[in-house]
Amino acid sequence: MLIAGGTAFVDGALRRLDVRVENGRVAEVGELTARPGEEVRSAQGQYVLPGFVDIHIHAYGGADCMRGEADVRRMSRGLLETGVAAFVPTTMSAWPNETYEALAGIQAVMDRPEPRGATVLGAHMEAPFLSPAFKGAQLGECLREPSVEAYMEMVRDLHCVRMMTLAPELPGALNMIAYLKAMGVVTCAAHTQAKAADIHAAADAGLTQITHLFNAQTPLHHREPGVPGAGLADERIIVQVIADGIHLHPDVLRISALCKGGAGVALISDSMEAAGLPDGQYDLGGQAVFVKDGAARLASGVLAGSTLLMHQAVRNMITLARIAPETVIPMATSTPADSIGAKGFGRIEPGACGVLALMDADWTFSGVVA
């Protein structure tokens, strides 16, 4: 297929280029001419972007990865239609056997991918090594102190874990970070009482990301920068940002982008099952979640994930935070992909994933090439 006449994001710039996709991969980029009999899709007046990469997503369209393989497959199929090329299903607090079953479902889709779906890159465990004081919508009764023994009780013989969010101030956390780094697992900090010094020490041990910056963590103060201050200041750390205009004020989105740049911010959805669905009552880990005006909250008022889609996050960063598109686009594509070593995603170049997201002149999502 030839995607012709669009403005493609290639090599860090938006340029009038055509893109040829063959057998699910980008084959050519340039000023191209259609071959005899080749399908041509006009992208006139549209931006052609790499498919989005979401490294923190719990659920979508009524499907939740904690429910197992069938739901992960539904997520894969549905997310592709929103321009997502690849994602990392994210677990939440549960009992060890429940976590194992969820991870087994994620691995099953990794091993046998959906024929037409977003690629599952692995699992992101957002529990159970979290601080009860900052549990947010996580189930407090399922939280534990970090240990290799506790980790192996949940993971057992599986090899799908690619990321883990933990509280680095907990006893055993630094050893856990070093262990996970040696296993090739990316570690992130959130749901944590950590001070700035704890975050820098965790980065020394191998931690490389902050999960949902400013949310479920100590705040930024001018005499104790807390988790956000340390994450924004430490060049070794990528910050995950929920750009829905609810979790973070547009000014905070702008500050984060100005501090870290396109290579230091990973846009995430952190979405729960109401993403892509109307307002109403939904479920998260057995807890009732009430969605009103797109904001998902427990009965207590605590935010319980989001209903954000990745293309909306891109638009919000451009229109609400007033960040240049050339800076924003990597935040949803190459930065998250590179942060977990997902080769072949996040860029439009020969050999890369052929899933492309199309957005119109107002940065509204207009379709997907897949």
Image: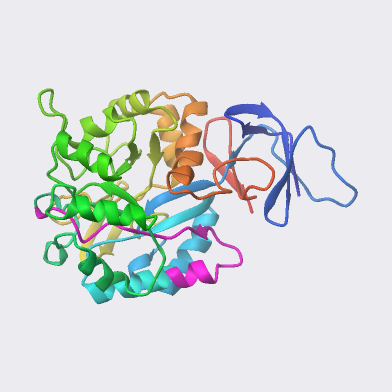
The quadrant where residue 94 appears:
bottom left
Please determine whether, in this image, residue 336 is positioned above or below residue 223: below
- Quarter holding the C terminus is bottom right
Q: Residue at 29% x, 25% y: name it.
A: 251
State yes or no: residue 11 in magenta. Answer: no
Q: Residue at 20% x, 65% y: name it.
A: 287
Q: What's the magenta region?
A: 107-132
Could you say which is closer to the camera, residue 56 or residue 104? 104
The quadrant where residue 68 appears:
bottom left
The quadrant where residue 237 appears:
top left
Q: Is residue 39 left or right of residue 204?
A: right
Count of numbered circles in the view: 0
Question: In this rendering, does residue 249 appear at all?
Answer: no
Q: Where residue 70 sits in the image (x, y, percent)?
A: 44, 74
Q: Residue at 49% x, 56% y: name it.
A: 79
Q: Is residue 298 left or right of residue 159?
A: left
Q: Residue at 36% x, 28% y: name it.
A: 260
Query: In the current view of this chain or complex, which residue is farthest to the right?
Result: 36
Q: Where residue 272 sits in the image (x, y, percent)?
A: 33, 57
Please determine whether, in this image, residue 229 is positioned above or below residue 49: above
Q: Is residue 15 left or right of residue 65?
A: right
Q: Where residue 46 sits in the image (x, y, percent)?
A: 63, 34
Q: Where residue 58 sits in the image (x, y, percent)?
A: 35, 58
Could you say which is closer to the camera, residue 230 or residue 213? 230
